[in-house]
Amino acid sequence: MKPAIHSSAYPAVVLFIVLIFLSCRKQDTTEDPPVTPQGPEMSGASVSGDNKLITLRFSKGIYKGGVLNQAVTADDFLVQVEGGAATADSFRVTHTAGHDSVVLRLYLKGLANGSERVTVKPNGAQAIVDNQAHPISETAQVVVQLADIGIIGSWVSTGENLSPVFQQFGFDSVYMQFRADGSYQFESFTTGGIHNYLTGTFVQTLSDTGSIRLIALSQQSPVSGTASGIFRLHDEPVARLVYEVVQTEPAVSGMTPPTPELGFGSSGLLGSDNIQVFLKDASDR
């Protein structure tokens, strides 16, 4: 038989139970520490097919730090190009305040060979913020890879760079633009004021012979036709393109497309007179 609790002990027992209850309630209602505000993050990036544009993506809309509702600018980023043959010359930034993407226009020195890694970082701890002035982490960065784009770009030939064939027909200047979407544009002017404008599509491929590459063109306007040949890129202060193609459809008697194995000047009857030299157009450097 359990001993009875004396009536004088009841107040102490009740007080003990109340204290335990209050203690439990205090523990149950303890609040978590406040969450540190999260600034914007660099969530990804992509490169255009001509290596010119890098589109940066952020986790939220961003603004320039230290000012009110201003778009970010080139001053807010650090850009570094490592590996490969091309190096960074300069860049500019296009952005709308509050948007979560930024377009960076990259200007390179030299021709990229596909081994270049571009690292983009914020230029300081307060360079980029969200709409509550929460900054991006100073250690944030994205890394993208450039590509070997070959002949893609804008090229111009004038003066002594014009092939003897072009000079014979009175050409004054020739412009060729090869786009990342596989289209091309040919534009020429003669000393007599004649303007030619041709468009079509092209395919470029590597060869097993040194640095000479293959190209096939399918002209669509103003008349249809095909041509094929070879080209070689020279990485110089102003990039140089040596180019030789022959019309294959309709075929031209005595003319055969040059091959990487036979090299430049293997176009048949024309020989080296069909070799064209272009320089990278100033607008594309």
Image: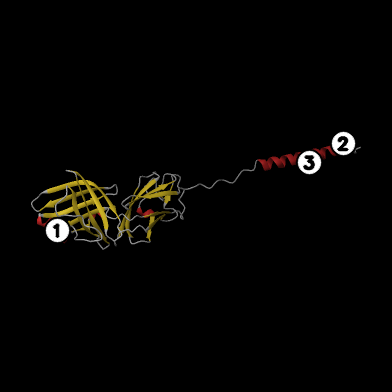
Q: Give the residue at mark 1.
A: 270
Colour pattern: secondary structure
Q: Residue furthest right?
A: 1
Q: Give the residue at mark 3.
A: 16
Secondary structure under tag 3 reads: helix
Q: Quadrant of residue 238?
A: bottom left
What kind of residue is marked 2? Ser
> Quick one: label 2 or label 1, which is nearer the N terminus?
2
> Quick one: label 2 or label 3, which is nearer the N terminus?
2
Residue drawn at x 68%, y 42% as measured from the top left: 26
Pair 1/3: label in front: 1
**Residue 162 - label:** none
Residue drawn at x 42%, y 49% as measured from the top left: 44
Pair 2/1: label in front: 1
Q: Nearer the viewer, residue 104 or 40?
A: 104
Task: Categorize mark 3 by other alpha carbons within 10 Å: few (<14), some (14-19), many (20+).
Answer: few
Residue 196 picture location, percent across and down: 14, 48
Q: Is residue 81 visible?
A: yes
Q: Nearer the viewer, residue 173 or 53?
A: 173
- Mark 2 and mark 3 in contact? Answer it, CB < 8 Å: no
Residue 247 picture location, percent across and down: 18, 51
Secondary structure under tag 2 reads: helix
Q: Give the residue at mark 2.
A: 7
Quadrant in the picture for the C terminus: bottom left
What kind of residue is marked 3? Phe
- Alpha carbons under labels 2 and 3: distance apart: 15 Å
- Mark 1 and mark 3 in contact? Answer it, CB < 8 Å: no
Secondary structure under tag 1 reads: loop
Residue 102 picture location, percent across and down: 37, 48
> Quick one: label 1 or label 3, which is nearer the N terminus?
3
What kind of residue is marked 1? Leu
